[in-house]
Image: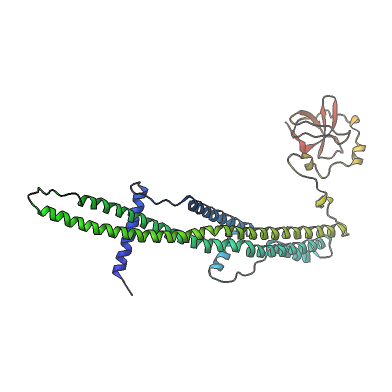
Amino acid sequence: MDFNVRKLATDAGIFFSRAVQFTEEKLGQAEKTELDAHFENLLSRADCTKNWTEKIYRQTEVLLQPNPGARIEEFLYEKLDRKVPPRPTNGEILGQFMLEAAKEFGPGTPYGSTLIKVGDCQRRLGGAEREFLQSSSISFLTPLRNFLEGDWRTISKERRLLENRRLDLDACKARLKKAKAAEAKAAAVPDFQETRPRNYVLSASASALWNEELDKAEHELRVAQTEFDRQAEVTRLLLEGISSTHVNHLRCLCEFVEAQAMYYNQCHKYMQELQKELGSSSGDIRCPDSLEVNSQPDVSPTNPSAYLPLNSPSTLETDALQIEEVQPPASGTRKAKVLYDYDAGDSSELSLRADELITVYTVPGMDSDWLIGERGNLKGKVPVTYLELLS
């Protein structure tokens, strides 16, 4: 083992000098070399890029793989430099379960045959998801990870070196300042009337020593300044490379969006094909019309009518129910508070305004999702979902 005591002592002295300089700067007892504004902007931009890239990378990992256990497993395989074993997606697992259930129930039954069709669609959706995950990992996650584990580590290393060079430079400036003060004090004019000329000899000797110390401090300052300038230039070049990193990440982001759009478009295509297949299938049991995606109304908080029950009365039922002939029961009427505005669809319905109170009751043979509402001399059907029944 090559143990160099002198080098160890030198390194320890440099470390102690930097620690003293850093502490004095924090306490406001020493001057600090400030970087120019452009350099500070580059540092701030680099830190911002690192922080947001890390957040985007982590959240994209969560988006692509919500299971934290699976993410940890993939991380361990990556650190061990081993290939991650293939893992079926949730859609593929669901599709497999549906196909196995269809075999048990009988593929010739309506439920079994539908399970086969839906299960096959789920497997195709799972396959599309697998392709999306793979392409996104290669085109988006990998470049972000390479920046964080490669370029950013290099930038951080050079920034630490620059900070050390700055501390060395400021320590040299402090030593030079002290040497100048001591040299000026030693070079003061001696008192020639002094009865003991020995003091004059000592003063001249001290002045010579401080002159030598001053020359040494100036030389160390020049060396430290040169090393600081060189390291600052290296760090500046790396920080200016952040612009090219942004360009690269922009290209990767566009590829990620393209892969995501293709994935959702493919899923939509598979679901449309499944709907057509289920809609055209013959049998005793058919899927309800409410499964048709394209026929669904817009659902939003500002459009409460989208929440009307699917089994609302048909036109024939409306015609059959003559509102004018309906009479309230002797008992069973209740008060109700209107939750949303409702515009009557025809003459058999009663328009409502939010927060008003009305009297409601039901009549035999009427759909359970509707009630008869009365407000003054007006009477008509009202949807239950728009009301809060009061005791």
In this rendering, position of residue 83 left or right of residue 364 = left
Q: Residue at x 82, y 24 (%)?
A: 376
In this rendering, position of residue 181 left or right of residue 31 = left
356 or 167: nearer the viewer: 167
In this rendering, position of residue 188 left or right of residue 66 = left
Spot occupied by residue 23 in the image (x, y as percentages of width and height): 35, 51
Residue 74 picture quarter: bottom right
Q: Residue at x 73, y 60 (%)?
A: 262
- Residue at the outermost bottom position: 1
Q: Residue at x 88, y 42 (%)?
A: 314
Spot occupied by residue 80 in the image (x, y as percentages of width and height): 53, 70
386 or 51: nearer the viewer: 51
Number of callouts: 0
Q: Quadrant of the N terminus?
A: bottom left
53 or 32: nearer the viewer: 32
Q: Is residue 332 at all visible to an observer of this figure? A: no
Spot occupied by residue 64 in the image (x, y as percentages of width and height): 64, 59
Q: Quadrant of the C terminus?
A: top right
Residue 208 picture quarter: bottom left
